[in-house]
Image (cartoon, rainbow, N blue to C red):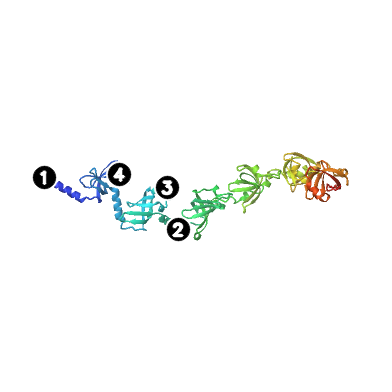
Amino acid sequence: MTPEKQALMDELYRETLHDIKEGEIVKGRVVAVNLREVVVDIGFKSEGFVPVEEFRNIGDLTPGIQIDVLIESIEDEEGRLVLSHLKAERLRGWMKLGDTINEGDIVEGRILKQVKGGFIVDVDGIEAFLPMSLSAFKGVSPQEITASRYKFQVAKLNKARRNLILSRREMVQKEKELVRDRLWGEIAKGQRRTGMVKGITDFGAFIDLGGVDGLLHITDMSWTRINHPSELVKIGDKIEVLILDFKREESKVSLGLKQIIANPWDGIYEKYPTGTKTKGKVVNVMPYGVFVEIERGIEGLLHSSEITWQKKLVNPQEMFKVGDAIEVQIINVDKDAKRISLSTKQLEENPWLEAGKRYLVGSRVKGEVRGFTDYGTFIELDSGLEGMIHISDMSWTRKINHPQDVLQKGQEVEVVVLAVDADNRKINLGLKQIVDNPWPQIAQRYPVNAEVDAQVVLNSNFGVFVKLDNDVEALVYSSEIERERASALKPGDKLRVRIIKVDVEQMKIGVSAKL
């Protein structure tokens, strides 16, 4: 090369270096793309390099296209020209936005990534910071957050330091208000809308209709009886509901779920007239009866008194369980109260119709002890009907304190039929009547003024009960024994007494310890 040409090249080189400065933004042409870098020609003595990580869509970088780059270093340690496309975009973004936005303005951007304490947001090439406390992204997945563009309010702006802090919270509130206003303008009575179950209480469920909450009361959930709203819905469920009523000034919306389907109680009298036999499924068992679903939305009560003709003491919880399939008969329908009374005993022949003929007064029958009360014992007869032995009909001579002093559950006994009242379903039985009344003989055995040895049975406030023999008890009146002596007596003690009164009609003997 001639000296003249060398001098010209040196001059051109110096002019090029003078025109390119670090920190400047220049146009460049993509020359090549590899796995690590994008090679860019900016008209310098050598080509520059940009890391591929700075480009969102590397596939769009075809050789020949022009891009903006920032000159970071004219010559690094390896003598290479270092360029940055990302910083060029950011700087141009600040140059563009710096004069147009202020604190409080609304901008739009996309979440790039989550960092400690918040998120990095791309706003027209500028990286802004969105603090977690101002993000309003609680409960939103990271995938959802980065999938959309959002509007933000400029919370703080420092143009000199190129520092932009955003807030999403105020925008979310404004968006909610806009959605809520639009929704209030759309809803109408009788309208169907889809909502999400937001909360559940004992009395119903709160449904988010998309900005306005409505109450789905438990009574408007199902035509069938439910004990708790959680039996039908759970938090997060999306359900279709009907607008029953609303008051915008009070922010109240009443919703219905059961009203979406036809009322199964319509035409109930024609469908289930009294006397109809049908099948159903036990859905609840209570001490007083059984709730039976005879079709979807229709339940009836099988009261304990309608379960059987035969047993007076019935515990439904021992006889049925939820899920049982049973046959019932309709005995009453009340559409207004949505009540149906059911019976299983009506499916059987009423044994009480023949009770008077089967159990003649004075006849002897056998039965099994089924239960006790303080005043008597229930006996199940061979037909399944129950009769009762009153405590006064258990012994001619003994004072019975409780029926279990005489009988045991499950014991078979022979009794006498004393009375039959088929209308009131009562059969009175007697145990003592199995033997003849012994009191005429007792009166002869214990004449007045006769002295006999007795054994103390019970010491009470009004006297001392004593046993004269195995079958006969008598009362020592409190006036017929000294108080100190009476108080010292205990069951089993021996006592000499004198007969002072025998009442055959009342079946009583009075005695005196004053001889």
Q: Which amino acid type is marked by label 4? A: Val
Q: Which mark is residue 141?
A: 3
- Considering only order in the chain, which callout, 2 or 3, is on the residue closer to the N terminus? 3
Label 3 and label 2: CA atoms lie apart by: 27 Å
Question: Few, some or many C-alpha atoms within 10 Å of disc 3 (few <14, some 14-19, many ≥20)?
Answer: few
| 368 left or right, relative to 158 | right
Disc 1, SS: helix
Residue receiving disc 2: 181
Whether residues under marks 4 and 1 lie with C-beta atoms below 8 angstroms apart, the answer is no
Disc 4, SS: helix
Residue 508, given in percent of the width and then of the height, sits at: 83, 47
Label 4 and label 2: CA atoms lie apart by: 47 Å
Residue receiving disc 4: 52
Q: Which mark is residue 233?
A: none
| Quarter the N terminus occupies | top left
Residue receiving disc 1: 3
- Considering only order in the chain, which callout, 1 or 4, is on the residue closer to the N terminus? 1
Label 4 and label 3: CA atoms lie apart by: 28 Å
- Considering only order in the chain, which callout, 2 or 4, is on the residue closer to the N terminus? 4
**Comparing marks 4 and 1, which lies closer to the viewer?**
1
Residue 437, given in percent of the width and then of the height, sits at: 84, 43
**Comparing marks 4 and 2, which lies closer to the viewer?**
4
| 384 left or right, relative to 290 | right
**Comparing marks 3 and 2, which lies closer to the viewer?**
3
Q: Which amino acid type is marked by label 3? A: Ser
Q: Which amino acid type is marked by label 2? A: Asp
Q: How many marks?
A: 4
| 435 left or right, relative to 385 | right
**Comparing marks 2 and 1, which lies closer to the viewer?**
1
Disc 2, SS: helix
Label 3 and label 1: CA atoms lie apart by: 69 Å
